[in-house]
Image (cartoon, rainbow, N blue to C red):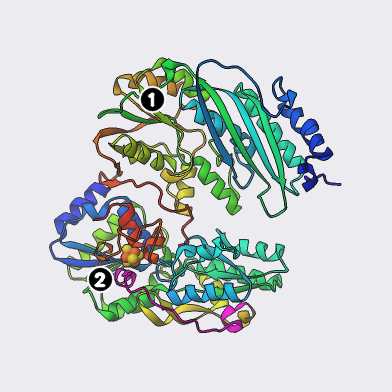
Amino acid sequence: MEEIILLSHGNGGESTRRLIEEEILKYFGNDILNQLLDSAIFDIKGRLAFTTDSFVVSPIFFNGGDIGKLSIYGTINDLSVMGAKPLYLSVGLIVEEGLSFEEFRKILLSMKAASEECGIKIITGDTKVVERGKGDKIFINTSGIGIIETSLDWRGRGIEQGDIVIINGGIGEHGLCIMIQRLGIKVGEEVKSDLAPLNSLVLPLLKISNNIKFMRDPTRGGVAGVLNEIAQKYSVEIEIEEEKIPIKPWVRSASEILGIDPLYSANEGKVIIIASRKDEDKIMSFLKNHPLGKDAEIIGEIKGKGNRVYLKTKLGTRRILDPLKRDLLPRIC
Amino acid sequence: MNTEELVKNIIKISKKEINIMEFCGTHTHEMFRYGIRQLLPSNIHLHSGPGCPVCVTSEEDIDYIIYLAENYDLGIITFGDLINVPGSNRNLNILRAKGKEVKVIYSPLEALSIARQNSHKKYLLIGIGFETTAPNLAYTLIKAKEENIKNLYFLSLHKLTPPAMKAILDMGEIKLHGIIGPGHVSTIIGRRGWKDIFDKYQVPFVITGFKPEEILYGIYQLIKIIEEEKPALINAYGKSVKEEGNIKAQEIMYKVFKIGPANWRGLGIIENSGLLLREEFEEFDIRKIYSVKVESKKNDLCKCGEVLRGIIKPTECPLYKKVCTPENPKGPCMVSAEGTCSAYYLYGGE
Ligand code: SF4
């Protein structure tokens, strides 16, 4: 008989205990989690970063990853771009009744591998099961704590005219990959999410340059979204050049077919960096020599005071690059 | 010629004050995206046409769908942008938020699996689009018939482009000196599909592709024949468009659909401009099953009708940007990415 998750696995009784001890602890177990106390207790000294994110991606398995891996890397990336070394995670699982144990275990295993890869421990968690139809297979929330060395804390390094805008590689891959898979289009293996943990890239980078003034991973809302946030928050005008933006050929064709601009499509292994031009060489050569930065490009610069983002097109014209104002839906014509 | 040379040549040969219309919403969108309008001399006036399928959906049709969903326990299956198009006072998105089943699909064949998996429920698939999408929907219905799917109905909002172009020329509200013809539609109907219109009105017409260099090339060809006063019907998108179009797609389309009247937002009912289901597919035809007349109120403040006919620019609409934005669209031209209002808004058209 196929084993599936049932409502009783979430009722707090014997099945729940078994689910936690025999499945979850088996994958995530460590000295803190294994105590199974109501709260995880631990000591850390220093400046901390704390973040949370919920993951509801469908399909839960996609080319280049799955919801489990995404939930770990997503939170690691939010900590890393702030200069924090990720330490501890909490994991909340909301499972829809009917999910097969096979898929459930696959997700747990992938979360285990992802957290080990990043040297982070899952120290507290929760599992709930909801009725069929009240969820979409599985939703995951993760929160993370990281510690920031003061010298890596880039906040307060003012962004100014002439600063450069860098991206560590091709844009729009995660969003377009998910969209294509939802459509059920058969595609080659080059089509995959860029899902990756950024800690190994950005933390050493912050060590070699103290002229990095801003970092953010452009997930929902894409590169256009993050650039607009920067323009508004720091009251600067940004100009990026269309021809400098790295875009993989499959992303370009998918975006043409679906009518979705890669600039608005989500990324899960990318970081936008604003830095002073004087560290350009240092930063670019570090990025180019890292597997997650080999396609890095300087895509634009800070033009001065303002609050808008402009795109210089390949025809040499200039237009506003607005933040996303609508749901990303494929064109019908 | 590369893009720079094309622009130089356009500037060099263009002398007259002229109005040209890009029929197709994708052209509008791409021209804004690449800032092509900025490159053209000021004596060339570009007007956007009604070539955005979502934008031309009438209030009556949206109201009809809402009425059906509310009164007959039908799940609605539709394509993306349509859910945000306002009817008289509501859209499908609001219906969905209130708990009605409104499913957004990306490919029409998904509708078949939804119907198959939920055989106890009835669904209404809404077909929308021009000649480019109609063959896909037709194929879906052929499959549905073959598989004997009984719980799926169909509402055709499919429209044909040449009759709308003709209606605009007949109205004569603006004197058009030339037309940038739609590339995608023409891959299906062929250059031949425009011949009747060209023969009758003798307005220069150039079928144009969508890459920036293709758009500029199309415009160059158009300006050339306008300036030389040698009207012609030119296919400048030969790599995709054949004289006779895509015969196979046409066959599939007309196996399922027949030509009849359609209700266009801004243009009203145009005879022979829509695709209706043939008798052989009547079992799917929602209009045959629930033929109710729903009262609609037009939103007088939204100027989409005028925008679609190319007689005003979105900036001349009192609601533009102030009340009507892509997040909170008051008219369909702000809903679709191909809508002229949305292109102006997103790409900073002043
Ligand atoms: S700006 Fe909005 S209200 Fe005005 S015409 Fe366009 S869609 Fe209609």
Ligand 1 within 8 Å of disc 2? The answer is: no
- Which quadrant of the picture is home to ligand 1? bottom left
Q: Nearer the viewer, mark 1 or mark 2?
A: 1
Badge 2: few (under 14), some or many (20 or more) residues near its Cα, within 10 Å?
A: some
Task: Please give the label number shown on residue A155.
Answer: 1
Would residue A287 appear left or right of B33 to someone viewing this image?
A: right
As displayed, is residue A241 above or below residue A136? Answer: above
Magenta span includes B117 = no
Q: Are marks 1 and 2 in contact (CB under 8 Å)?
A: no
Give me the C-alpha separation between circle 1 and circle 2. Answer: 51 Å
| Amino acid of disc 1 | Arg
Badge 1: few (under 14), some or many (20 or more) residues near its Cα, within 10 Å?
A: few
The residue indicated by pointer 2 is B311
Residue B103: x and y in percent read 58, 62
| Amino acid of disc 2 | Ile
Residue at disc 1, secondary structure: loop
Q: Could you tell me if residue A107 is visible in this image?
A: no
Closest to the observer, A107 or A246: A107
Magenta span includes B299 = yes
**Which span of residues is magenta-colored?**
B284-310
Secondary structure character of the magenta stretch overall: loop
